[in-house]
Amino acid sequence: MRVAFVTPRYGREVVGGAESAARQLAEHLVASTGWCTEVFTSTALDHLTWRNELEPGDQTMNGVLVHRFSPEAERSSKFYELDGRIRLAPGHATREQAEDWIDMNGPVTPRLVEALCASSADVAAFYPYLYYPTVRAIGRVPMPAVLHPAAHDEPALYLPVFADTFASADALVFHTMAERRLVQRHYPVAGFPQLLLGLGTELPPARRRPGREVLGSGDRPYVASVGRVDEHKGSKMLAAYFAEYKARRPGPLALALVGPVAYRPPRHPDVVLTGMVSDEDKYDVLRDALALVSPSALESFSLAVTEAWTLELPVVVNARCGPTREHCERSGGGMWFGSYREFETVLDRLVADVALRRDLGARGRRYVERHYRWPVLIERYARFLEEVSARGKLSAEAVAASVRGSEPANGPVRAVAASPGLNRRGQSPPRRG
Amino acid sequence: MIASGSDPLPASDDYLRQVMAEIDEEVRRRRGEIPLQLERELDELFLEHAPVSARAGDLKDALALVDRAAFIDPVVPVTSERPAGTAIKKGLRSLSLWYMGWVTHQVSQFGAAASRALHAVDAQLEDLQARVPPASPTFVLDPETGDAWWSVRAVDALLGARGRVLHVACGDGWLVRRLSAAGVDAYGVDPRPDMAVDAELEGADLRQEEPLEHLRAVGRASLGGLVVSGIVEAMEPARRDELVRRAADRLGARGVLVVHSLSPEAWFANDAPVEADLSTGRPLRPRTWAHLLATWAVEVSEGPGGADYAVVARRAPT
């Protein structure tokens, strides 16, 4: 098998997000199967600018052959003007506006698209749905296309241009059931071959030092939040909630915000910002925490949650985040909050109840062992890719029918009557796309 | 408070449901402990980056948003970065407050009235749902053989299907596996939690989804075949109506629909599944299916003892 991944950025420097997931999947696929795995990507590392930072051309990274192509231009400020205009009502954007949005969103890499179309790969895996390489290539590639949408409930998902993107996939891979529900609510892809995969979770490194030493917070108990400290990731809300919590519950409890800082919350004696830390330090902090708090409503999987469960740490998640709440509901390993009062109540209970913390953590760990260890995950993914490759491209006829919403081949059925004599023709008029 | 720390661990869903019910109870008990304005500000902070539709069909969340937005505050903030800004804004606010207050009072009244109406609709929907609980699928397999008498007919009818074949209420995927072994590209959905998880982990395309929700998200005329078993007996009429319409709409040319149902006689017998008493639906007679699928070529096979039957309906080629 020869597998081609398509992702806008690629490299160890790209932390978190769909692109990082694509890299881990590609590297584990090579390591486990020995398949020829290549990546078509840009030379950019920053998704806000698409600035050329790496050399174009080919290089091998951890067994993966990486083809890099320079974006034709950096992202212009016009993108933000257009984005601001259409994000208020993205479903009402015109096709032309949506096409412009795709080009301005970038990275504009037509040579990547040409090279991918000329590739001899058996399957192309696109990750995520949102960017130029996926949108412009997925309908053109000669090999079966697997789309990993990594979709959030974000305005872009509603842009009319993505109907073709989803319809052009020959198979879909989702992180969670919540993501699948979200995509299927907007695009008629339920009948496509699908795999609910998620992301692999590494075994934690051995303990190096106490988490309190990493934080420099003395012997205080603490809860931790791991990931980019960012307003959009709920960090502002979490910092404000924790400050209010401490005003109402004075005591030693602290909050550790662990990760690169894009938003700096107001200074507070009980809030520790670590900035970017090594994986070892991150796990050391988690090991000694009372719980992990994931305040973000916009996660499509959340490795932080599964990593915490690896250490049998209970988690507290945002009730409005479908994927993390789904993790908690399926595993029984965490609780959620949808208001300050709920946050306070959940935290009170967790801090006071050691046995509950232990039970939740154990359930979370069992869930991760069953679903999200790399060997299990890669075996399922490899089998799925083989099936997709064997099945080949979905017929153009079926795709066209699905996209256009064409009239079914035969006449309508009768509706079930409420009472005899009230039968009526039951089919709604055909939609014209 | 529930006992925790027990071993072995109780089932995840029951355990967590109980813990979260206790949390909800405590949250209700704490109502009024936090000053109203402060709580509102904190809740607005929560909603700042929360997608409205993150939880599909969560009417309670949507209503909470309406409630929070229903009151329009006429007292606009006056802080300013410029030295005289605050004083100027304060002056403008004082001058315009009589007017703004009059307008916003009416808008707030409208918002409150709309919110009340939505809450009334919500209450009625909850009442309806309580009266008509969704029926869970009935088991269709013979417990002794682990098979169903009609499965051979279903597989025969679906060989050579022009497109994927969907088994609705697929259970653990028994028929999907049989169809796949016969070379049919089949997949299944089942609404019961964890029913399909093991099979899915082993690589089958089985999903935990509500059948109608799934069918709504399937492309038109994109399926080669559809098998429905264990759910039509207890379905309330409106949902069964939708199921039949969606099935016809989602099947392509030469599509095949296979429906398995208990017979009305079996439904009212003493050994009928409990759904017979608990649901508002009842099984149709085979001739009713033939009537509903009037433009299709319909074959009906009765099961041993007349307790159930299978309908195989083929869409005529165009």
Image (spheres, rainbow, N blue to C red):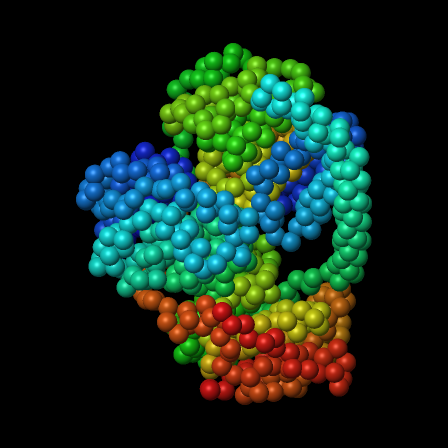
Give the residue drawn at x 59%, y 30%: A237
**To which quarter of the image does residue B240 belong?**
bottom right
Of the 4 image quadrants, the one containing the N terminus of chain B is top right
Vertical comparison of B205 with A370: above or below = below
Figure label count:
0
User: Residue A242 lies in what quarter of the image?
Assistant: top right
Q: Position of residue A168 (x, y in %)?
A: 39, 63
Q: Is residue A130 visible?
A: yes
Instruction: Name the residue at 35% across, 42% down.
Output: A75
Q: What residue lies at 65% left-to-right and 22% top-to-bottom? A: B86
Residue A222 appears in the rendering:
no
In this view, A126 is above or below A246:
below
Residue placed most toward the observer, B225 or A397: A397
Residue A121 relative to residue A101: left or right: left
Expressed as whole percent of the image width and height from the top left, the position of residue B315 reads: 51, 83
A189 in relation to A128, above or below: below
Q: Residue at x 57, y 17 (%)?
A: A268
Question: In the current view of this chain or complex, which residue is farthest to the top?
Answer: A218
Q: Depth check: B308 or A170 in front?
A: A170
Please provide percent x and percent y for residue A270. Answer: 57, 17
Q: Position of residue A123 (x, y in %)?
A: 30, 58
Identify the image quadrant of residue B236.
bottom right
